[in-house]
Amino acid sequence: MLKVATSVMFAMAIIASPVWAQTASSAGGQSHNDAIVKMRQEEAAAKKEYKRKVAEAQKVFDEQKAAAKKERDAAIAAAHAAAGQK
């Protein structure tokens, strides 16, 4: 019984701890005075822009690759048709 009471008191102490009462800070686009924080925000923005450009280039690449595959498949089909194969 003593173990149960101790466990309950320990759990209540943890729940009532001031750490649990802290609110989450807003991660929205807030400007910060700390130079390191600003640097990290600028790095994150640069990485985000890079990833956007890479995704855009990958989309163009995929479209061109699909078009080339279509042309290749058509040429192969024409070659098979000319040879009387299917």
Image (cartoon, rainbow, N blue to C red):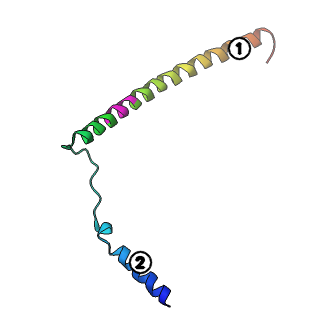
Q: In the figure, is residue 70 to the left or right of 2?
A: right
Question: Within the magenta stretch, is there residue 47?
Answer: yes
The majority secondary structure of the magenta stretch comes to: helix
Which of 80 and 42 lies nearest the eye of the viewer? 42
Q: Hey, which quadrant is residue 45 in on the image?
A: top left
Residue 8 rendering spot, x and y as whole percentages:
43, 83
First to last magenta residue range: 45-50
Indicate which disc, 2 or 1, sits on the residue closer to the N terminus: 2
Badge 1 marks a residue whose secondary structure is helix
Looking at the image, which residue is at 67% across and 12% down?
75
Crowd class of label 2 (few under 14; some 14 to 19; many from 20; radius 10 Å): few
The image quadrant where one finds the C terminus is: top right
Residue at x 67%, y 17% (from the top left corner): 73
Left/right placement of residue 85 relative to residue 16 reads right
Q: What label does residue 11 carry, if any? A: 2
Taking the view exactly as shown, the residue that stands out farthest to the right is: 84
- Mark 2–mark 1 CB contact (< 8 Å): no
- Residue 51 percent location from the top left of the image: 41, 31
Instruction: Name the amino acid, label 2.
Output: Ala
